Amino acid sequence: MSAAEARPPYYLGIDLGGTNIKSGVVDDVGRPLSAVSVETLAENGPKAGIATLARAGRLAVEKSGLSWDQIKGIGLGSPGTMDLSRGMLLEPPNLPGWNQLEIRDLLAAELQKKTVLQNDANAAAYGEYWAGAGRHERSLVLFTLGTGIGCGIIDEGRIVEGRHSHGGECGHIIIQMENARQCSCGAYGHLEAYASATALVKRALEALEREPSGSPLHQIPAEELTSRDINEAATAGDPLARRLMRETARYLAVGA
């Protein structure tokens, strides 16, 4: 959609990830005008990270065809842990060294725009509620599946943040008590240990070692196997991959 077709006011969204920073501009009904992705380079530290966030934002506005003055505000999504009321990152696992960082106010000062901070999964859930798959619903739950599991909960149009900003952290709810798998956090039986993309690959490797078969997944070196490979094999009809995907769906259903 061109800037001429868009409906003001306009907003800049920035998503901070451990690997990439993604940014884009949307209009007042959530229609995208631009999308940009740059490397986070988190190892360079938070000061350099704030500069990279700002650069990603400016690139998105430039690509949108709008002027900077037309941007009403900025939404920043980030992985936890965080204190939303204070706009702080606390101890984010995939951003080592970015601890106790007043990221909201630092970015607002850098870009001279009002900025709000939200957990990335909460922001994704609200995006679906506002302008996506959940736009006709009053409440919804969204799972983000990657290295771990993120979750956002929308209840009658309100993001459930919880008293300590972790109300939607459902990746660590316990879905298995006996003989449970170990989660990346060190505890056992968590949803993340069963249904994240990382867990899917681990379960696939265990199944391939335990059950020699004609699965095409046997042709992929263990260190190169990805969740995408498993999904593609399932779509192509591979029985082992299809079973792994069904099991993942069941684990997610238990978590939901």
Image (cartoon, helix red, strand yellow):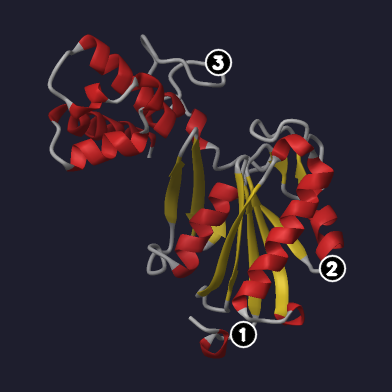
Residue shown at the point (50%, 33%) measured from the top left: 148
Q: Name the residue under label 3.
A: 186
- Residue 245, image x, y percentages: 25, 34
Find out whether the residues at labels 3 and 2 contact each other: C-beta distance under 8 Å. no
Label 2: which secondary element: loop
- Residue 234, image x, y percentages: 20, 37
Find out whether the residues at labels 2 and 1 contact each other: C-beta distance under 8 Å. no
Amino acid at pointer 2: Gln
Between 176 and 155, the residue placed more toward the observer is: 176
Residue closest to the far right: 109
* Mark 3 / mark 2, whichever is N-terminal: 2
**CA–CA distance in space, label 1 to label 3:** 47 Å
* Mark 1 / mark 3, whichever is N-terminal: 1
Residue shown at the point (38%, 63%) measured from the top left: 133
- Residue 156, image x, y percentages: 49, 61
Residue 152 horizontal side relative to residue 250, left or right: right
Q: Report the number of discs.
A: 3
Residue 174 horizontal side relative to residue 27, left or right: left
Q: Mark 2 points at which residue?
A: 112
Asked whether the viewer can see residue 249, the reply is: no
Amino acid at pointer 1: Pro
Find out whether the residues at labels 1 and 3 contact each other: C-beta distance under 8 Å. no
Amino acid at pointer 3: Gly
Q: Indicate whether 11 appears above or below 200.
A: below
Between 152 and 157, the residue placed more toward the observer is: 152
Residue 101 horizontal side relative to residue 58, left or right: right
Residue shown at the point (79%, 38%) measured from the top left: 45
Labelled disc at residue 8: 1
